[in-house]
Image (cartoon, helix red, strand yellow):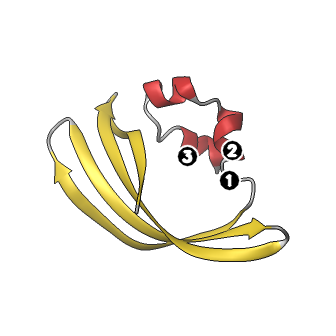
Amino acid sequence: NYAAGYQLMDSHLQSLNSPSDYAGWFANKVAIQPVSIDLVSQTDAEAVVRSVVSSTDRVNGQDVTSQVSEQFVLHKENGAWRIDEVTRLG
């Protein structure tokens, strides 16, 4: 559900990416399966979360699966946690 996923981004990140840009990030996505999710730190206003997922993408007509590690910085916005920054790890 691209609309729901787009709403997880804070207003600053949304201002940098249109809904169609966001949906385009997943154009060749076949599947995503969480492997681990770890809370690194949390205050009242910011949280840092690291995740590992098994990601399957269509590449040149073939399904290619890899493990992807990312770190998310979340900020409170309008009473909800919103993604402010995403960094791919190693």
Inter-mark Cα distance, 1 to 2: 6 Å
Q: Position of residue 63 (x, y in %)?
A: 74, 76
Q: Is residue 44 left or right of residue 31?
A: left
Contact between marks 1 and 3 (CB within 8 A): the answer is: no
Task: Work out whether mark 1 precedes mark 3 in sequence or the reverse, and give the earlier one.
Answer: 3
Residue on which the image places disc 1 = 26
Q: Residues within 10 Å of mark 2 (few under 14, many from 20)?
A: some
Q: Residues within 10 Å of mark 3 (few under 14, many from 20)?
A: few
Inter-mark Cα distance, 2 to 3: 9 Å
Mark number displayed over residue 70: none
Residue on which the image places disc 3 = 5
Residue on which the image places disc 2 = 23
Give the number of callouts.
3
Q: Residue 19 appears in which quarter of the rendering?
A: top right
Label 3: element kind: helix
Q: Residue 22 appears in which quarter of the rendering?
A: top right
Please, what is the three-letter code of the amino acid marked with disc 1? Answer: Phe
Give above or below for 14 relative to 54.
Answer: above
* Mark toward the viewer: 2 or 3: 2
Q: Is residue 30 left or right of residue 68?
A: right
Please, what is the three-letter code of the amino acid marked with disc 2? Answer: Ala
Image point 26% across, 50% down: which residue? 48
Contact between marks 1 and 2 (CB within 8 A): the answer is: yes
Q: Is residue 41 left or right of residue 10?
A: left
Image point 24% across, 46% down: which residue? 47
